[in-house]
Image (spheres, grey):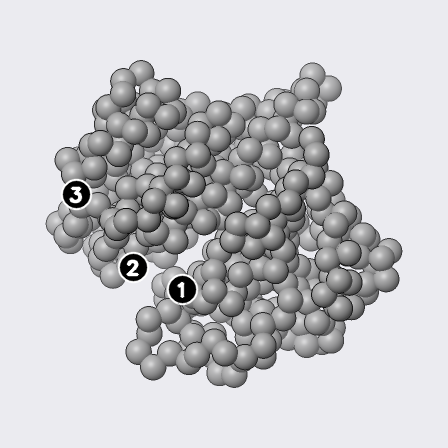
Amino acid sequence: MAIYQYNFPTKIHFGPGAIALLPEALKGAGKKRPLIVTDRGLASLAPVRDTAALLNDAGLPVSVFSGVFGNPVKSQVSAGVAAFQAHGADAIVGLGGGAAIDVAKAIALMAHHPGDLFDYEDEKPGALPIDREIPWWASVPTTAGTGSEVGRSTVVSDDVSHVKKIIFSPRLLAERVFADPKFTLGLPASVTAATGMDALTHLVESYLARGFQPLCDGIALQGVRLLSQSLVRAVDFAKRIERGESALIDDEEHLEARGMMLNAALMGGVSFQKGLGVTHSLAHALSTVCDLHHGLANGICIPYAMAFNQSVAGERLSDLAILVGAHEESPAGLLRWLEELKAAIGIPRTLSEVGVRAEHLGRLVDIAVADACHPSNPRPVTRENFEELFRAALGCA
């Protein structure tokens, strides 16, 4: 596979070995002391080790901040800002999954902006303007899920309440994206599946979202097509590696599946500027109340959410059914395909299988009703609707 460059909305370098272009990009921007922001679990693994060595060998002394874990919280951002200042950094490389990249964006914001991170919360009355210097930063995704690498927002939770806060500005866009499928080859099957379902949910919900945005619609459809052809393959490759069958895997086929998943994920990150929907409000509540992985929450909930939407979005759900090759070119066909996909990649059918209980229901509904995603859902969602959806997803409807 070759390395390609395309600009949408920021400059993207895609292909095996694309990371080798990072030192040149930093030097071209006049940067000398980068800080890598990454997940705790990645810090000792090849993507971080190799990237740090690449930068050091190029005469770019690097420091690694690996204080990101779980759903990102404000204290991680504060610790990252301290690491940025201690290193005398002039650039940031966000390397990891969506959490690491979101924290990298927030560190870039707070490196030169005063006050508290949540003073910049999107649509907060009296929010401070994002009008000061943002350090040059690049994103290097190691999962194919959130699309945060091309996003203009960061989502960070309060340490105490765990409520997610969104900080948004076009100025938070990465200067460069290095989408190197080699960095995703070692992802476990479970992570590949959960992050893949996150990408799918972004694409599906943005296509269904209210409003006229034909550019996002087209990107979403192509993203769904790529994902429908690649996610099961990528998970199957991961399962075979976990069984010790690496020698039997065609490396080119594995790279192609992982590469198409990276593209599908970043296309989801672009398309959902149109809006998201009820699935995300369900998932945000589940992350807040039950600390459930965001992609896993989306993956479990999306069939129930699409069943709720079919009365008003039947034509678009049928479009998606045709695109993914469902057995029926109808909303019912898409719902069946979603359930079959979940079973094929190991996503549980219900929330009860991952420890969510009926006693969580009141708090889940409170958080979901207040969430900012469902107003763009094609069908309005009431408090009673949320309770019904959570009950259905729990398996008790």
The N terminus sits in image quarter: top right
Residue 315 in the image: state x and y as whole percent.
Answer: 22, 31
Q: Are marks 2 and 3 in contact (CB under 8 Å)?
A: no
Between circles 2 and 3, the one closer to the viewer is 2
Labelled disc at residue 166: 1
Q: Which mark is residue 21?
A: none
Label 1 vs 2, first from the N-terminus: 1
Answer few, some or many: residues within 10 Å of disc 2's Cα (few below 14, many 20 plus, some between 14 and 19).
some
Q: CA distance from mark 1 to mark 2?
A: 9 Å
Q: Residues within 10 Å of mark 3 (few under 14, many from 20)?
A: some
Q: Tell me which label, 2 or 3, sits earlier in the chain.
A: 2
- Above or below residue 203? Residue 94 is below
Q: Residue at x 70, y 34 (%)?
A: 2
Quarter where residue 40 is shown:
bottom right
**Could you tell me the amino acid type at mark 2?**
Ala
Please determine whether, in this image, residue 271 is positioned above or below residue 30: above
Q: Percent x, y for residue 14?
A: 64, 42
Q: Amino acid at mark 1?
A: Ile
Residue 293 visible in the displayed image? no
Work out whether 309 lies above or below 35: above
Verify CB contact (< 8 Å) between mark 1 and mark 2. yes
Q: Residue at x 15, y 53 (%)?
A: 383
Quadrant holding the C terminus:
top left
Q: Residue at x 60, y 34 (%)?
A: 259
The residue identified by callout 3 is 388
For mark 2, give the secondary structure.
loop
Q: Viewer-proximal residue, 97 or 380?
A: 380
Locate residue 57, reporting x and y percent.
86, 56
Looking at the image, can residue 88 be seen? yes
- Is residue 176 found left or right of 29 in the rendered image? left
Q: Which residue is mark 2?
A: 372
* Amino acid type shown at disc 3: Glu
